[in-house]
């Protein structure tokens, strides 16, 4: 699946991962807490190759691209 991540700055990243869904992607953006999920405020790797690092609080939107 290809997912385009658009940041608040306008910078765009395309994540291409096999056997990956939007829900899988969204799970990486949140931390589990006793009262529910909280958006992670710190750097995370956007891709499994660990080449792109972002802060999820600066994501403006995501878009699923057709392959």
Image: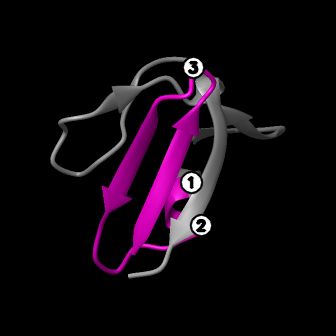
Residue 17: which quarter of the image?
A: bottom left
- Above or below for 5 versus 44: below
Separation (CA) of disc 1 from disc 2: 6 Å
Q: Earlier in the sequence, mark 3 or mark 1?
A: 3
Secondary structure under tag 1 reads helix
- The picture places residue 36, in percent across and down from the top left corner, at 80, 43
Q: Is residue 37 above or below residue 18?
A: above
Regarding residue 39, the answer to whether it shows in the image is yes
Asked whether 10 falls inside the magenta stretch, the response is yes
Labelled disc at residue 23: 2
Distance CA(mark 3)–CA(mark 2): 24 Å
* Disc 3 and disc 1 in contact, CB within 8 angstroms: no
Where's residue 26, x and y in %?
59, 54
Q: Which residue is mark 1?
A: 27
Instruction: Say few, some or many: other residues with alpha carbon within 10 Å of mark 3 (under 14 / 14 to 19 / 20 or more).
Output: few
Q: Are marks 1 and 2 in contact (CB under 8 Å)?
A: yes
Is 50 on the left or on the right of 25, as rendered?
left
**Residue at position x 18%, y 36% in the image:** 51
> Judging from the image, what secondary structure is the residue with disc 3 in?
loop
**For residue 56, above or below residue 50:** above
Q: State which quadrant residue 41 falls in.
A: top right
13 sits left or right of 23 in the view: left
Q: Is residue 28 visible?
A: no
Work out which quarter of the rendered image holds the N terminus and state it. bottom left
Point 28% across, 77% down: residue? 18
Q: Nearer the viewer, residue 40 or 33?
A: 40
The residue labelled by disc 3 is 9
- Magenta extent: 1-25
């Amino acid at each position: 699946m290809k997912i385009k991540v658009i940041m608040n700055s306008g910078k765009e990243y395309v994540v291409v991962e096999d056997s990956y869904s939007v829900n899988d992607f969204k799970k990486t953006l949140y931390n589990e807490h006793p009262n529910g999920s909280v958006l992670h405020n710190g750097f995370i790797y956007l891709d499994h190759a660990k080449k792109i690092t972002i802060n999820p609080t600066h994501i403006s939107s995501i878009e699923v691209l057709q392959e």
